[in-house]
Protein backbone atom coordinates (compact mmCIF):
# COMPACT_ATOMS: atom_id res chain seq x y z
CA UNK A 1 0.00 0.00 0.00
CA UNK A 2 1.53 3.29 -1.17
CA UNK A 3 2.02 5.89 1.56
CA UNK A 4 2.52 9.54 0.67
CA UNK A 5 4.42 12.12 2.69
CA UNK A 6 2.85 15.46 3.45
CA UNK A 7 4.61 17.22 0.54
CA UNK A 8 3.71 14.44 -1.89
CA UNK A 9 0.05 14.57 -0.84
CA UNK A 10 0.09 18.36 -1.16
CA UNK A 11 1.43 18.10 -4.74
CA UNK A 12 -1.23 15.51 -5.55
CA UNK A 13 -3.86 17.87 -4.15
CA UNK A 14 -2.66 20.66 -6.42
CA UNK A 15 -0.72 22.85 -4.00
CA UNK A 16 2.21 23.09 -6.45
CA UNK A 17 0.08 23.85 -9.50
CA UNK A 18 -1.58 21.77 -12.18
CA UNK A 19 1.60 20.44 -13.84
CA UNK A 20 2.99 19.05 -10.58
CA UNK A 21 -0.42 17.65 -9.76
CA UNK A 22 -0.56 15.81 -13.09
CA UNK A 23 3.04 14.62 -12.60
CA UNK A 24 2.28 13.33 -9.09
CA UNK A 25 -0.87 11.63 -10.32
CA UNK A 26 1.18 9.81 -12.99
CA UNK A 27 3.83 8.80 -10.45
CA UNK A 28 1.22 7.50 -8.00
CA UNK A 29 -0.29 5.30 -10.71
CA UNK A 30 3.21 4.11 -11.66
CA UNK A 31 4.16 3.36 -8.03
CA UNK A 32 0.94 1.44 -7.45
CA UNK A 33 1.49 -0.64 -10.59
CA UNK A 34 4.98 -1.51 -9.35
CA UNK A 35 3.76 -2.30 -5.84
CA UNK A 36 6.02 0.38 -4.31
CA UNK A 37 5.19 1.46 -0.76
CA UNK A 38 6.75 4.91 -0.90
CA UNK A 39 8.69 7.38 -3.02
CA UNK A 40 12.32 8.41 -2.71
CA UNK A 41 13.55 11.91 -3.31
CA UNK A 42 15.48 11.94 -6.53
CA UNK A 43 18.11 14.55 -7.30
CA UNK A 44 19.26 13.59 -10.78
CA UNK A 45 17.06 13.01 -13.81
CA UNK A 46 18.03 12.09 -17.36
CA UNK A 47 15.27 11.90 -19.94
CA UNK A 48 13.88 13.46 -23.10
CA UNK A 49 11.30 15.87 -21.64
CA UNK A 50 8.93 17.49 -24.08
CA UNK A 51 11.00 16.58 -27.11
CA UNK A 52 9.26 15.48 -30.25
CA UNK A 53 9.96 14.39 -33.76
CA UNK A 54 8.28 16.12 -36.68
CA UNK A 55 5.94 13.13 -36.90
CA UNK A 56 4.85 13.61 -33.29
CA UNK A 57 4.55 17.35 -33.71
CA UNK A 58 2.32 16.91 -36.74
CA UNK A 59 0.15 14.49 -34.78
CA UNK A 60 -0.40 17.07 -32.04
CA UNK A 61 -0.87 19.84 -34.60
CA UNK A 62 -3.79 17.90 -36.04
CA UNK A 63 -5.21 17.71 -32.52
CA UNK A 64 -5.00 21.51 -32.30
CA UNK A 65 -1.86 22.32 -30.29
CA UNK A 66 1.72 21.22 -31.01
CA UNK A 67 3.49 23.52 -28.54
CA UNK A 68 6.20 22.24 -26.19
CA UNK A 69 3.70 22.52 -23.33
CA UNK A 70 1.15 20.47 -25.25
CA UNK A 71 3.61 17.66 -25.99
CA UNK A 72 4.93 17.71 -22.41
CA UNK A 73 1.40 17.60 -20.98
CA UNK A 74 -0.14 14.99 -23.21
CA UNK A 75 2.75 12.77 -24.21
CA UNK A 76 4.98 12.98 -21.12
CA UNK A 77 2.50 13.58 -18.29
CA UNK A 78 -0.38 11.58 -19.79
CA UNK A 79 -2.65 14.57 -19.18
CA UNK A 80 -5.63 15.45 -21.39
CA UNK A 81 -5.42 18.96 -20.04
CA UNK A 82 -2.56 21.13 -21.38
CA UNK A 83 -0.81 22.54 -18.34
CA UNK A 84 1.79 25.27 -17.86
CA UNK A 85 5.07 23.43 -17.37
CA UNK A 86 7.18 25.08 -14.66
CA UNK A 87 10.96 25.06 -14.19
CA UNK A 88 12.29 21.64 -13.21
CA UNK A 89 12.67 21.00 -9.48
CA UNK A 90 15.97 19.09 -9.53
CA UNK A 91 19.04 18.57 -11.69
CA UNK A 92 17.71 17.40 -15.04
CA UNK A 93 19.40 16.70 -18.34
CA UNK A 94 18.31 15.79 -21.84
CA UNK A 95 19.67 12.54 -23.27
CA UNK A 96 20.47 11.81 -26.92
CA UNK A 97 17.97 12.49 -29.65
CA UNK A 98 17.35 14.34 -32.85
CA UNK A 99 19.98 15.26 -35.36
CA UNK A 100 23.49 16.66 -35.53
CA UNK A 101 23.39 20.48 -35.39
CA UNK A 102 25.78 20.78 -38.35
CA UNK A 103 25.73 17.52 -40.34
CA UNK A 104 21.95 17.05 -40.37
CA UNK A 105 21.73 17.32 -44.19
CA UNK A 106 24.16 14.37 -44.58
CA UNK A 107 22.05 12.46 -42.06
CA UNK A 108 19.07 12.97 -44.35
CA UNK A 109 17.05 15.43 -42.25
CA UNK A 110 15.10 18.38 -43.60
CA UNK A 111 15.46 22.07 -42.79
CA UNK A 112 12.05 21.81 -41.12
CA UNK A 113 13.29 19.02 -38.80
CA UNK A 114 16.36 21.06 -37.88
CA UNK A 115 14.27 24.16 -37.17
CA UNK A 116 11.96 22.07 -34.99
CA UNK A 117 14.92 20.71 -33.01
CA UNK A 118 16.11 24.27 -32.33
CA UNK A 119 12.65 25.21 -31.06
CA UNK A 120 12.47 22.14 -28.80
CA UNK A 121 15.91 22.86 -27.37
CA UNK A 122 15.10 26.49 -26.65
CA UNK A 123 11.94 25.41 -24.83
CA UNK A 124 13.76 22.76 -22.77
CA UNK A 125 16.53 25.22 -21.90
CA UNK A 126 13.99 27.75 -20.72
CA UNK A 127 12.62 25.14 -18.29
CA UNK A 128 16.06 24.59 -16.71
CA UNK A 129 16.88 21.32 -18.49
CA UNK A 130 20.53 20.85 -19.39
CA UNK A 131 20.86 19.93 -23.07
CA UNK A 132 23.62 17.33 -22.82
CA UNK A 133 22.13 15.44 -25.81
CA UNK A 134 24.05 12.25 -25.15
CA UNK A 135 23.66 8.64 -24.06
CA UNK A 136 26.77 9.15 -21.89
CA UNK A 137 25.74 11.93 -19.49
CA UNK A 138 28.51 10.71 -17.15
CA UNK A 139 31.03 11.87 -19.80
CA UNK A 140 29.38 15.24 -20.13
CA UNK A 141 29.39 16.41 -16.53
CA UNK A 142 26.47 14.51 -15.02
CA UNK A 143 28.20 12.10 -12.63
CA UNK A 144 25.88 11.17 -9.76
CA UNK A 145 27.49 10.24 -6.44
CA UNK A 146 27.37 6.78 -4.91
CA UNK A 147 23.97 6.13 -3.36
CA UNK A 148 22.31 9.07 -5.11
CA UNK A 149 18.75 8.27 -6.20
CA UNK A 150 18.44 8.99 -9.91
CA UNK A 151 15.77 8.57 -12.56
CA UNK A 152 17.52 7.83 -15.83
CA UNK A 153 16.44 6.55 -19.20
CA UNK A 154 18.87 4.96 -21.72
CA UNK A 155 19.88 1.40 -20.90
CA UNK A 156 23.64 1.88 -21.37
CA UNK A 157 23.63 4.88 -19.04
CA UNK A 158 21.47 3.11 -16.46
CA UNK A 159 23.81 0.12 -16.18
CA UNK A 160 26.82 2.46 -15.87
CA UNK A 161 25.05 4.54 -13.23
CA UNK A 162 24.18 1.53 -11.05
CA UNK A 163 27.30 -0.55 -11.55
CA UNK A 164 30.24 1.80 -11.94
CA UNK A 165 29.05 4.88 -10.05
CA UNK A 166 27.04 3.06 -7.38
CA UNK A 167 24.18 5.53 -7.84
CA UNK A 168 20.65 4.12 -8.02
CA UNK A 169 18.19 4.07 -10.87
CA UNK A 170 15.75 1.81 -12.61
CA UNK A 171 15.43 2.05 -16.38
CA UNK A 172 12.83 4.78 -16.51
CA UNK A 173 10.73 6.05 -19.41
CA UNK A 174 10.09 9.53 -20.75
CA UNK A 175 6.87 9.77 -18.71
CA UNK A 176 8.38 8.90 -15.32
CA UNK A 177 11.49 11.04 -15.92
CA UNK A 178 9.39 14.02 -16.99
CA UNK A 179 7.18 13.64 -13.90
CA UNK A 180 10.24 13.22 -11.66
CA UNK A 181 11.75 16.43 -13.03
CA UNK A 182 8.73 18.37 -11.82
CA UNK A 183 8.33 16.66 -8.45
CA UNK A 184 11.74 15.31 -7.39
CA UNK A 185 10.08 11.94 -6.65
CA UNK A 186 10.39 8.41 -8.03
CA UNK A 187 8.99 5.12 -6.67
CA UNK A 188 11.19 3.44 -4.06
CA UNK A 189 11.42 0.18 -5.93
CA UNK A 190 13.94 -2.05 -7.68
CA UNK A 191 17.45 -0.65 -7.86
CA UNK A 192 16.68 2.05 -5.28
CA UNK A 193 16.60 -0.67 -2.61
CA UNK A 194 19.62 -2.39 -1.05
CA UNK A 195 18.15 -5.89 -1.19
CA UNK A 196 17.60 -5.67 -4.96
CA UNK A 197 21.21 -4.85 -5.84
CA UNK A 198 23.00 -8.12 -5.13
CA UNK A 199 24.17 -10.42 -7.90
CA UNK A 200 22.22 -13.61 -8.45
CA UNK A 201 24.27 -15.09 -11.32
CA UNK A 202 28.00 -15.76 -11.50
CA UNK A 203 30.05 -15.58 -14.69
CA UNK A 204 33.44 -17.23 -14.32
CA UNK A 205 35.76 -15.80 -16.95
CA UNK A 206 38.34 -18.29 -18.10
CA UNK A 207 39.88 -16.42 -21.02
CA UNK A 208 41.97 -13.25 -20.84
CA UNK A 209 39.63 -10.26 -21.08
CA UNK A 210 41.61 -7.10 -21.63
CA UNK A 211 40.78 -4.92 -24.63
CA UNK A 212 37.65 -2.83 -25.15
CA UNK A 213 36.58 -5.38 -27.76
CA UNK A 214 37.09 -8.22 -25.22
CA UNK A 215 34.93 -6.41 -22.68
CA UNK A 216 32.23 -5.74 -25.28
CA UNK A 217 32.07 -9.44 -26.20
CA UNK A 218 31.97 -10.46 -22.54
CA UNK A 219 29.13 -7.99 -21.97
CA UNK A 220 27.23 -9.46 -24.89
CA UNK A 221 27.70 -12.95 -23.41
CA UNK A 222 26.54 -11.69 -19.99
CA UNK A 223 23.31 -10.29 -21.39
CA UNK A 224 22.59 -13.42 -23.40
CA UNK A 225 23.11 -15.70 -20.42
CA UNK A 226 21.64 -13.81 -17.44
CA UNK A 227 18.87 -11.89 -19.25
CA UNK A 228 17.55 -9.31 -16.80
CA UNK A 229 19.35 -10.66 -13.73
CA UNK A 230 22.39 -9.15 -12.01
CA UNK A 231 25.66 -10.91 -12.84
CA UNK A 232 28.93 -10.84 -10.95
CA UNK A 233 31.88 -11.16 -13.29
CA UNK A 234 34.86 -12.99 -11.86
CA UNK A 235 38.10 -14.47 -13.19
CA UNK A 236 40.70 -13.53 -15.82
CA UNK A 237 39.89 -9.86 -16.08
CA UNK A 238 42.11 -6.85 -16.59
CA UNK A 239 41.25 -3.76 -14.56
CA UNK A 240 38.44 -2.23 -16.67
CA UNK A 241 38.62 1.50 -17.37
CA UNK A 242 35.69 3.78 -18.15
CA UNK A 243 35.53 2.79 -21.83
CA UNK A 244 35.62 -0.95 -21.06
CA UNK A 245 32.79 -0.53 -18.54
CA UNK A 246 30.88 1.52 -21.10
CA UNK A 247 31.13 -1.17 -23.77
CA UNK A 248 30.53 -4.06 -21.38
CA UNK A 249 27.39 -2.51 -19.90
CA UNK A 250 25.94 -1.34 -23.21
CA UNK A 251 26.39 -4.82 -24.70
CA UNK A 252 24.89 -6.58 -21.66
CA UNK A 253 21.90 -4.24 -21.71
CA UNK A 254 21.34 -5.00 -25.42
CA UNK A 255 21.69 -8.77 -25.69
CA UNK A 256 19.83 -9.02 -22.36
CA UNK A 257 18.29 -6.51 -20.01
CA UNK A 258 21.18 -6.11 -17.56
CA UNK A 259 20.77 -2.96 -15.45
CA UNK A 260 23.54 -3.68 -12.96
CA UNK A 261 26.61 -5.89 -12.65
CA UNK A 262 29.40 -6.39 -10.17
CA UNK A 263 33.11 -6.97 -10.64
CA UNK A 264 34.69 -7.93 -7.29
CA UNK A 265 37.36 -5.49 -6.20
CA UNK A 266 36.33 -3.06 -8.94
CA UNK A 267 32.72 -1.91 -8.76
CA UNK A 268 31.81 0.04 -5.63
CA UNK A 269 29.30 -2.37 -4.10
CA UNK A 270 31.46 -5.46 -4.61
CA UNK A 271 34.57 -5.37 -2.43
CA UNK A 272 34.63 -9.15 -2.89
CA UNK A 273 32.64 -11.98 -4.47
CA UNK A 274 30.70 -12.82 -1.29
CA UNK A 275 29.49 -9.25 -0.82
CA UNK A 276 28.48 -8.98 -4.49
CA UNK A 277 26.28 -12.05 -4.01
CA UNK A 278 24.84 -10.75 -0.73
CA UNK A 279 26.26 -13.73 1.13
CA UNK A 280 24.21 -16.18 -0.95
CA UNK A 281 25.21 -18.81 -3.45
CA UNK A 282 24.72 -17.91 -7.13
CA UNK A 283 21.53 -19.30 -8.63
CA UNK A 284 23.42 -20.18 -11.80
CA UNK A 285 27.10 -20.16 -12.76
CA UNK A 286 28.19 -19.69 -16.37
CA UNK A 287 31.67 -20.22 -17.74
CA UNK A 288 33.09 -17.86 -20.34
CA UNK A 289 36.13 -19.38 -22.02
CA UNK A 290 37.80 -19.27 -25.42
CA UNK A 291 35.03 -21.30 -27.04
CA UNK A 292 32.26 -19.04 -25.70
CA UNK A 293 34.20 -15.98 -26.82
CA UNK A 294 34.56 -17.43 -30.34
CA UNK A 295 30.81 -18.10 -30.48
CA UNK A 296 30.05 -14.52 -29.41
CA UNK A 297 32.46 -13.15 -32.03
CA UNK A 298 30.81 -15.29 -34.71
CA UNK A 299 27.31 -14.26 -33.72
CA UNK A 300 28.28 -10.57 -33.74
CA UNK A 301 29.70 -11.05 -37.24
CA UNK A 302 26.86 -13.21 -38.53
CA UNK A 303 25.50 -10.34 -40.63
CA UNK A 304 28.73 -9.66 -42.49
CA UNK A 305 28.95 -11.16 -45.99
CA UNK A 306 30.67 -8.74 -48.34
CA UNK A 307 34.07 -7.63 -47.05
CA UNK A 308 33.81 -4.36 -49.02
CA UNK A 309 33.11 -1.89 -46.21
CA UNK A 310 31.62 1.49 -47.13
CA UNK A 311 30.71 2.89 -43.68
CA UNK A 312 32.47 2.86 -40.32
CA UNK A 313 30.51 4.09 -37.34
CA UNK A 314 32.29 4.65 -34.02
CA UNK A 315 30.97 6.05 -30.77
CA UNK A 316 28.35 3.68 -29.39
CA UNK A 317 27.87 4.54 -26.58
CA UNK A 318 28.99 8.07 -27.43
CA UNK A 319 32.78 8.24 -27.70
CA UNK A 320 34.99 9.40 -24.87
CA UNK A 321 37.82 11.84 -25.49
CA UNK A 322 40.23 8.87 -25.25
CA UNK A 323 38.40 7.09 -28.03
CA UNK A 324 38.42 10.16 -30.26
CA UNK A 325 42.14 10.54 -29.59
CA UNK A 326 42.65 6.91 -30.61
CA UNK A 327 40.68 7.41 -33.82
CA UNK A 328 42.64 10.58 -34.64
CA UNK A 329 45.93 8.75 -34.04
CA UNK A 330 44.90 5.86 -36.30
CA UNK A 331 43.73 8.23 -39.03
CA UNK A 332 46.53 10.78 -38.87
CA UNK A 333 47.93 11.42 -42.35
CA UNK A 334 45.65 8.88 -44.04
CA UNK A 335 42.84 9.51 -46.50
CA UNK A 336 39.42 7.93 -46.69
CA UNK A 337 38.50 7.20 -50.30
CA UNK A 338 35.48 8.78 -51.95
CA UNK A 339 32.45 6.55 -51.55
CA UNK A 340 33.28 5.53 -47.99
CA UNK A 341 32.28 7.31 -44.77
CA UNK A 342 33.54 7.44 -41.19
CA UNK A 343 31.14 8.97 -38.68
CA UNK A 344 32.10 9.18 -35.00
CA UNK A 345 29.31 10.00 -32.55
CA UNK A 346 29.84 11.74 -29.24
CA UNK A 347 28.37 14.35 -26.91
CA UNK A 348 28.55 18.08 -27.55
CA UNK A 349 30.83 18.58 -24.58
CA UNK A 350 33.34 15.88 -25.62
CA UNK A 351 33.32 17.22 -29.19
CA UNK A 352 34.05 20.67 -27.79
CA UNK A 353 37.20 19.29 -26.17
CA UNK A 354 38.11 17.37 -29.34
CA UNK A 355 37.75 20.62 -31.30
CA UNK A 356 40.03 22.50 -28.91
CA UNK A 357 42.64 19.73 -28.99
CA UNK A 358 42.76 19.66 -32.79
CA UNK A 359 41.41 16.09 -32.91
CA UNK A 360 38.35 17.07 -34.93
CA UNK A 361 40.59 18.73 -37.51
CA UNK A 362 42.81 15.64 -37.79
CA UNK A 363 39.77 13.42 -38.30
CA UNK A 364 38.23 15.84 -40.80
CA UNK A 365 41.51 16.05 -42.74
CA UNK A 366 41.25 12.30 -43.29
CA UNK A 367 37.67 12.60 -44.45
CA UNK A 368 35.98 11.51 -41.19
CA UNK A 369 33.26 13.45 -39.37
CA UNK A 370 32.49 13.84 -35.67
CA UNK A 371 28.77 14.17 -35.01
CA UNK A 372 26.83 14.81 -31.81
CA UNK A 373 23.41 14.28 -30.23
CA UNK A 374 22.47 11.05 -31.95
CA UNK A 375 23.79 7.94 -33.75
CA UNK A 376 22.88 5.74 -36.69
CA UNK A 377 20.62 3.44 -34.66
CA UNK A 378 18.75 6.06 -32.66
CA UNK A 379 18.42 8.43 -35.62
CA UNK A 380 17.82 5.64 -38.13
CA UNK A 381 20.22 6.87 -40.77
CA UNK A 382 23.39 5.75 -42.50
CA UNK A 383 25.39 7.56 -45.19
CA UNK A 384 23.57 7.55 -48.50
CA UNK A 385 24.10 4.24 -50.28
CA UNK A 386 25.90 2.52 -47.37
CA UNK A 387 25.50 -1.25 -47.45
CA UNK A 388 28.34 -2.74 -45.40
CA UNK A 389 29.18 -1.27 -42.00
CA UNK A 390 32.10 -1.88 -39.65
CA UNK A 391 31.46 -1.29 -35.94
CA UNK A 392 33.45 -1.53 -32.70
CA UNK A 393 30.31 -1.70 -30.55
CA UNK A 394 28.43 -4.92 -29.79
CA UNK A 395 25.37 -2.80 -28.98
CA UNK A 396 25.35 -1.11 -32.37
CA UNK A 397 25.87 -4.45 -34.14
CA UNK A 398 22.88 -5.79 -32.23
CA UNK A 399 20.57 -3.07 -33.56
CA UNK A 400 21.82 -1.52 -36.80
CA UNK A 401 21.61 -4.36 -39.36
CA UNK A 402 17.94 -5.03 -38.68
CA UNK A 403 17.04 -1.35 -38.41
CA UNK A 404 18.82 -0.13 -41.53
CA UNK A 405 19.07 -3.28 -43.63
CA UNK A 406 22.87 -3.21 -43.76
CA UNK A 407 25.51 -5.89 -43.35
CA UNK A 408 27.72 -5.38 -40.30
CA UNK A 409 31.15 -6.43 -39.12
CA UNK A 410 32.28 -6.24 -35.50
CA UNK A 411 35.88 -5.75 -34.37
CA UNK A 412 38.27 -3.41 -32.61
CA UNK A 413 38.49 0.30 -33.33
CA UNK A 414 41.74 -0.39 -35.19
CA UNK A 415 40.03 -3.12 -37.30
CA UNK A 416 37.30 -0.64 -38.21
CA UNK A 417 39.64 2.18 -39.17
CA UNK A 418 41.83 -0.18 -41.19
CA UNK A 419 38.71 -1.25 -43.09
CA UNK A 420 37.80 2.40 -43.62
CA UNK A 421 41.21 3.16 -45.14
CA UNK A 422 41.60 -0.01 -47.24
CA UNK A 423 37.91 -0.58 -47.97
CA UNK A 424 38.22 -4.24 -46.95
CA UNK A 425 37.23 -5.96 -43.71
CA UNK A 426 40.06 -8.09 -42.32
CA UNK A 427 39.03 -8.51 -38.69
CA UNK A 428 39.81 -11.78 -36.96
CA UNK A 429 38.61 -13.36 -33.77
CA UNK A 430 41.11 -12.51 -31.00
FE1 LIG B 1 24.18 5.85 -27.72
FE2 LIG B 1 23.20 5.32 -30.07
FE3 LIG B 1 24.63 3.55 -28.87
S1 LIG B 1 22.27 6.55 -28.54
S2 LIG B 1 24.28 3.85 -26.70
S3 LIG B 1 25.33 5.58 -29.56
S4 LIG B 1 22.71 3.12 -29.91
Image (tube, rainbow, N blue to C red):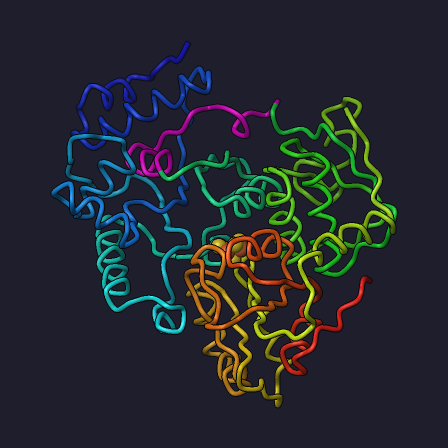
Say if the magenta span includes residue 383. Answer: no
Q: Is residue 372 above or below residue 5?
A: below
Q: Is residue 143 above or below residue 320?
A: above
Q: Is residue 356 left or right of residue 181?
A: right
State the residue in front, 37 or 107. 107
Residue at coordinates 63% horizontally, 78% vertically from top-left?
420
Q: Quadrant of residue 241?
A: bottom right
Residue at coordinates 68% horizontally, 83% vertically from top-left?
422
**Residue 170 x/y as whole percent:** 50, 34
The residue sitting at the left extreme is: 64
Q: Is residue 77 above or below residue 352?
A: above
State the residue in front, 393 or 58. 58
**Residue 331 x/y as whole percent:** 62, 82
**Residue 76 x/y as whole percent:** 29, 37
Q: Is residue 324 above or below residue 315?
A: below
Quadrant (top left, top right, bottom left, bottom right) of the C terminus: bottom right
Q: Quadrant of residue 180?
A: top left
Residue at coordinates 23% horizontally, 36% vertically from top-left?
74
Range drawn in magenta: 175-195
**Residue 82 x/y as whole percent:** 15, 36
Say if the magenta span includes residue 182. Answer: yes
State the residue in front, 230 or 110. 110
Task: Assign the magenta stretch its main secondary structure.
Answer: helix
Q: Is residue 174 left or right of residue 330?
A: left
Q: Is residue 217 left or right of residue 59?
A: right
Residue at coordinates 28% horizontally, 23% vertically from top-left?
25
Amino acid sequence: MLKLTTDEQAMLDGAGGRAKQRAMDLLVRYAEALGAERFVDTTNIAGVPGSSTLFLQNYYRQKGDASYEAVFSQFDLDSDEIVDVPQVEVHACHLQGGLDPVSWPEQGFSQEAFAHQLEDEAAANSHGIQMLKTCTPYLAGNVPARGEHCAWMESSAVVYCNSVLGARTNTEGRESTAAAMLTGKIPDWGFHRDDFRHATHLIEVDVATESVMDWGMLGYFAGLTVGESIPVIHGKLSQPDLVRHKHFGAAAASSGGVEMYHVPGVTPEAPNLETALGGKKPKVTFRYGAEERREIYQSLNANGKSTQVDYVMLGCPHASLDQIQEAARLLDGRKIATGRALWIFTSRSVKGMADLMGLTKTIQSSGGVIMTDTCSAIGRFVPKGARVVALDSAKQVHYLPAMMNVEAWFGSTADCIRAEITGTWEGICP
